[in-house]
Amino acid sequence: MIVDDVWVTGGSINFDDRSFRLNDECNLNVLDKDFAAAQIRVFEADKARSKRLIPDEFRKRPWYLRAVENFSGLFRSVL
């Protein structure tokens, strides 16, 4: 996350009980305009290479992908 083009925070913390209580997760916080500018450039480059997710296309994805997703969902409480 980049705030006001000067503060960057990144890491593995999610805002849920598992992250806060069970997992040893943390974020790195940097207050530096140059570092924030570099991270914005990285984000914009990633965004330029990304593909828009169209709801209709997502619904029409192959059955085997949906099967893998559903199977993986069985383990969501431990992932």
Image: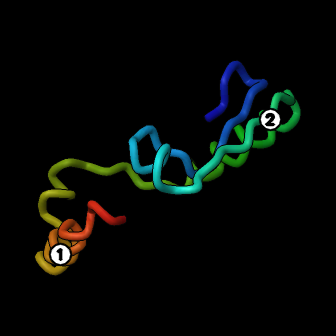
1 or 55, nearer to the observer: 1
x, y percentage for residue 60? Answer: 13, 63
x, y percentage for residue 62? Answer: 16, 74
Mark sitting earlier along the chain (1/2) = 2
71 or 75, nearer to the observer: 75
Mark 2 highlights which residue? 30
Residue shown at the point (82%, 28%) measured from the top left: 31
Q: Secondary structure at mark 1?
A: helix
Label 1, label 2: how many angstroms apart (C-alpha)? Answer: 39 Å
Tag 2: Cα neighbours inside 10 Å, few (<14), some, or many (≥20)?
A: some
Mark 1 highlights which residue? 71
Q: Residue furthest top?
A: 4
Is 20 above or below relative to 22? above
Q: Quadrant of residue 67?
A: bottom left
x, y percentage for residue 12? Answer: 57, 51
Q: Secondary structure at mark 2?
A: strand
Is 56 above or below relative to 68? above
In the image, taking residue 76 as reference, residue 39 lies left or right, namely: right
Amino acid, disc 2: Val
Task: Please identify the quadrant where the N terminus is shown.
Answer: top right
Tag 1: Cα neighbours inside 10 Å, few (<14), some, or many (≥20)?
A: few
x, y percentage for residue 69? Answer: 22, 70
Residue shown at the point (64%, 48%) measured from the top left: 26
Amino acid, disc 1: Phe
